[in-house]
Image (tube, rainbow, N blue to C red):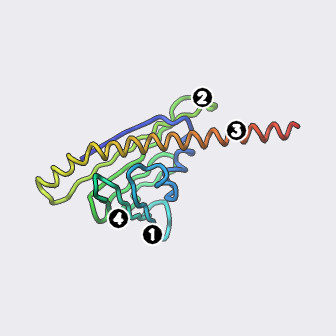
Amino acid sequence: MRLSESVDVAADADAVWSFIADPTRVLHFMSGITRWEVLSEEPSGMGSRYRMLMRVGSAEVGSLIEIVEFSPGRDLAWTSVTGVDQRARWRLRERGDDPQRPRTHVEFRLSYGVAGAGITGWLSERVAAPQVREHLRRSLAQLKRQVEHEQQRASAAERRARRTARA
């Protein structure tokens, strides 16, 4: 099953990247994820591995995943090593020409399947799809909210610092 959702975030790509590439932040914005445990020596970057579980219905399903693409500020992709067969990709693309008002288009793609399960695997993929799609939508909405909130806080702190420096 292939799913894809996207959103525009009022921040530059580096600000969004700081959330999706940081394994300590994943559980703060990824909906349905119940475990995101670093299993490699390096906590992030190419080759990093994580134990990832997602709640689908009453079950927690997941995989051991490995980062297979890591282009800072642009793309992060993983594939499963064991467990549920899955591939995912975060794509970040800056939008707009106004450096005062940066925008980033964020796309999250996920494809998953139950390898070798035949018709029952196909059926379970279809049954899980609406809930998994909702997890993708919520994840993007929460990412947008958190990144934009952090941008507002940083902007307010900068204004306060300028006022204090003038006084």
Q: Which residue is mark 3?
A: 156
Mark 1: amino acid: Ser
Mark 3: amino acid: Ala
Q: Which residue is mark 4?
A: 64
Q: Secondary structure at mark 3?
A: helix
* Residue 55 relative to residue 93: left or right: left
* Residue 35 relative to residue 167: left or right: left
The residue located at (52%, 50%) in the rendering is: 19
Disc 4, disc 3: CB below 8 Å?
no
The residue located at (19%, 51%) in the rendering is: 124
Residue 67 position within the rendered picture, expressed as x and y whole percent measured from the top left: 41, 59
Mark 2: amino acid: Asp
Measured in 3D between alpha carbons, the distance from the residue under mark 2 to the one under mark 1, in whole angstroms, is 40 Å
Q: Nearer the viewer, mark 2 or mark 3?
A: 3
Q: Which residue is mark 2?
A: 98
N-terminal label among 1 and 3? 1
N-terminal label among 2 and 4? 4
Disc 2, disc 4: CB below 8 Å?
no
Disc 1, disc 3: CB below 8 Å?
no
Task: Using a 10 Å C-alpha cutoff, classify the residue at mark 4 as few (fewer than 14 neighbours), some (14 to 19) or many (20 or more).
Answer: many
The quarter of the picture where residue 153 lies is top right
Label of residue 120 in the image: none
Task: Using a 10 Å C-alpha cutoff, classify the residue at mark 3 as few (fewer than 14 neighbours), some (14 to 19) or many (20 or more).
Answer: few
Relative depth, front residue between 32 and 49 = 32
Measured in 3D between alpha carbons, the distance from the residue under mark 2 to the one under mark 4, in whole angstroms, is 41 Å
* Residue 68 relative to residue 21: left or right: left
Q: Is residue 49 above or below residue 162?
A: below
Residue 55 position within the rendered picture, expressed as x and y whole percent measured from the top left: 33, 55
Q: Secondary structure at mark 4?
A: strand
Disc 2, disc 1: CB below 8 Å?
no
Q: Which residue is mark 1?
A: 40
N-terminal label among 2 and 3? 2
